[in-house]
Image (cartoon, helix red, strand yellow):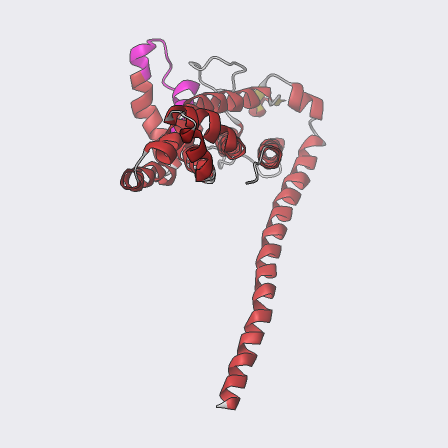
Amino acid sequence: MIKTNKRKNNLLKTSEKSVPIFLLFCATISVLTTIGIVFTLLRESITFFSDVSLADFYLGVNWSPWSGKFGVAPLITGTLLITFIAICVALPLGVASAIFLSEYATNKTRKIIKPILEVLAGVPTVVYGYFALTFITPLLQGLIPDLKIFNALSAGIVVGIMIIPMIASLSEDAMNAVPNHLRAGALALGATRLEVTFKVIIPAALSGIIASVVLALSRAIGETMIVTIAAGASPNLTFDPTQSIQTLTAFIVQGAKGDTTYGSTIYYSIYAVGITLFVFTFIMNMLSQYISRKFREDY
């Protein structure tokens, strides 16, 4: 009996020592993967920028790689236009959904609505793309007769619909984290539920709400299939949402096709666009973390 207990104790001690090693191994793999991605992007981008100057790439206004024109500004403006339309759609709907789920819905209603809302996050983006092309665009053409079949407006709207669950879910979590005694105190002072929501709950949960919006912006910037299918492949330097545009991610899809010669300048331009997109998303993630730390409320 004593020997059995000793064996069990030794086994537990061994497992206790091995678990941190395993977790460190997993964390190391994640870090090395990130380093590998950044290294690949930098290595291939340096090759590209040895042929095309940084000034021509980032300040040029003509993007036609197969004609030797590598001004990435039209792709950046297209990406920003899609992101702006998406956040105009997702921000009010997402925050409103979070307010309802957190402050107004009963437990039974929340258990029904929240899973349905989060189903949107599981829909493949290619399905969203064809939804934008075959449903949203014809619907908008009834309101805007001159709207082109490929346009930034329908793509931006559907990207906004796609990121609603991210804003709604994270914002609701932030609101639920606000202590109930703040709600009770405000209600005891005579505030209405609406006043409690907008004057107590939202200010207290502001860091989480803003962080959710910034993360949703990062998701919108990196979206690929919706904009590839619905927004077209015309790198126009325009902020007109009715026009066909091309985003950074859409070009990566186009450039990665079989007609791009390995080792050519066009091939390396994929990595230059990729590292530009990486910088955008990296800045957004850093901004999200900064906002979370800056405006976090401790109770």
Q: Which residues are magenta?
A: 140-161
Which percent across, then down, holds residue 9?
Answer: 54, 80
User: For the point 52% across and 14% down, which residue is it?
Assistant: 238
Question: Quick check: 172 above or below 5?
Answer: above
Which percent across, then down, holds residue 77?
Answer: 55, 20
User: For the point 44% across and 29% down, which residue is it?
Assistant: 186
Q: Is residue 142 left or right of residue 236?
A: left
Query: For residue 137, which quarter of the picture?
Result: top left
Total numbered labels placed on residues in the image: 0
Q: Is residue 294 left or right of residue 81?
A: right
In-front residue for pair 293/11: 293
Whether residue 60 is in magenta: the answer is no
Question: Quick check: 142 above or below 210?
Answer: above
In-front residue for pair 140/273: 140
Do we see residue 100 in this rendering? yes
User: For the point 64% across and 47% down, which residue is it?
Assistant: 35
Which percent across, then down, holds residue 114?
Answer: 33, 39
Q: Is residue 117 left or right of residue 265?
A: left
In-front residue for pair 183/105: 183
Whether residue 142 is in magenta: the answer is yes
Query: For residue 40, which quarter of the picture?
Result: top right
**Image quadrant containing the C terminus:** top right
Do we see residue 222 in this rendering? no
Query: For residue 275, which quarter of the picture?
Result: top right
In-front residue for pair 193/99: 193
Which percent across, then down, holds residue 43?
Answer: 68, 41
Question: Quick check: 102 above or below 13?
Answer: above
The residue lying furthest to the front in this view is 189
